[in-house]
Image (spheres, grey):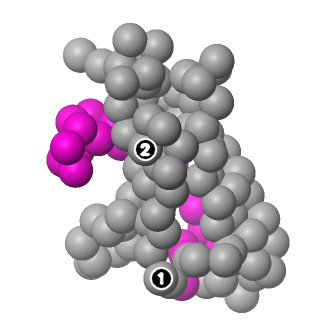
Amino acid sequence: QVQLVESGGGLVQAGGSLRLSCAAPGSIFSISDMAWYRQSAGAPRDVVASITSAGNTDYAASIKGRFTITRDNAKNTVYLQMGSLKPEDTAVYYCATMRRGQVVYWGQGTQVTVSS
């Protein structure tokens, strides 16, 4: 069982920032595209941002300009820097490894709560 270890969630006021981290086994990370998804109560799990193994990024329209996804291949870790947070960003955030556009492994999820 491949384990993705997430950290960095928490409670923040609107307008604040948080950085999420997700560490993966090196053998998986090096060949994988990575993504962050989020799921709020009663809603489907949607992709927020993705980064290919080559470093190309893509973002959901709702967070573009506020969030940045990066990866550190030496640390086998992907990050999601979140800024200008809004209450509607409140959700459980999941990292995922991707191959050919499909999720292969999920992280356990980390709660992000933005208060107004």
> What kind of residue is marked 1?
Ala
* Residue 76: image location, x then y, percent: 55, 22
Which is more N-terminal, label 2 or label 1?
A: 2
Vertical placement of 110 versus 86: above or below?
Answer: above
Residue at 51% x, 56% y is 57
Magenta segment: 88-114
Q: Which residue is mark 2?
A: 52
The quadrant the N terminus occupies is top left
x 27%, y 78%: residue = 42
Q: Is residue 6 visible?
A: no
Q: Nearer the viewer, residue 10 or 56?
A: 56
The image quadrant that residue 89 belongs to is bottom right
**Label 2 is placed on what type of residue?**
Thr
56 or 86, nearer to the observer:
56
Observer-nearest residue: 44 or 102?
102
Look at the picture and state if 5 lies above or below 40: above
- Quadrant placement of the C terminus: bottom right
Q: Tell me the tag on residue 74.
A: none
Q: Nearer the viewer, mark 1 or mark 2?
A: 2
Give the residue number, with chain letter if any, for mark 1.
61
Most extreme residue toward the top is 27
Q: How many marks?
A: 2
Give the class, few, some or many, for how many residues have Cα within 10 Å of label 1's Cα (few <14, many ≥20): few
Q: What is the CA distance from the residue labelled 1 to the residue labelled 2?
A: 18 Å
Visible residue check, residue 112:
yes
The answer to whether 48 appears left or right of 12 in the picture is left
42 sits to left or right of 54: left
Residue drawn at 61 percent across, 83 percent down: 87
Residue 80 coordinates in the image, percent (x, y) = 61, 52
